[in-house]
Image (cartoon, rainbow, N blue to C red):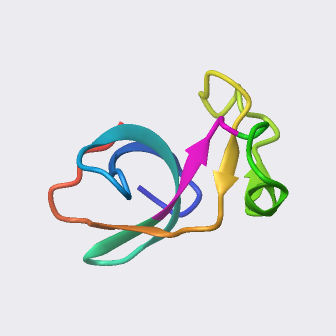
């Protein structure tokens, strides 16, 4: 796993219990932590403010995504590197 890799990781929900496996863009990998941005296909119904935080993935099909997608640069997710299972 390296910077700019697109992988699938389990991401916890922010306001409720649980989470789901979702594609993320790796921002940085250190000895103990992986930092990533989540990938979303939910763009059209978002506010103008939220859309400013989304960066379009130009060649989303080549990236292995199922539909047009954006990188959400509004939040950085941090995962402990130990025990990470990614696809």
Q: What secondary structure do most residues of the magenta stretch adopt?
A: strand
Magenta run includes residue 39 = yes
Q: Residue furthest bottom?
A: 31
Q: Residue at x 61, y 28 (%)?
A: 65
Tell which of 71 and 18 is nearer to you.
18
**In the displayed structure image, the side of residue 75 where residue 30 appears, left or right:** left
Tell whether 29 sits left or right of 58: left
Within the image, what quadrant is residue 55 found in?
A: bottom right
Q: Give the range drawn in magenta.
A: 36-42
Q: Which residue is drawn at 74% across and 46% down?
A: 46
Judge whether residue 55 is colored magenta.
no
- Residue 86 rendering spot, x and y as whole percentages: 32, 43
Residue shown at the point (35%, 51%) measured from the top left: 13
Q: In the displayed structure, does residue 42 sit left or right of residue 17?
A: right
**Of the pair 50 and 63, the residue shown nearer to us:** 50
Left or right relative to 41: residue 77: left
Residue 58 vs 35, above or below: the answer is above
| Residue 80 position in % (x across, y down) | 24, 68
């Amino acid at each position: 796993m390296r910077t700019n890799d697109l992988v699938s990781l389990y991401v916890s929900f922010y306001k409720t219990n649980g989470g789901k496996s979702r594609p993320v863009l790796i921002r940085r990998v250190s000895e103990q932590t992986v930092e990533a941005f989540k990938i979303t296909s939910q763009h059209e119904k978002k506010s103008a403010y939220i859309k400013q935080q989304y960066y379009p993935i130009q060649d989303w099909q080549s990236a292995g995504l199922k539909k047009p997608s954006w990188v959400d640069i509004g939040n950085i997710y941090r995962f402990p590197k130990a025990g990470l299972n990614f696809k």
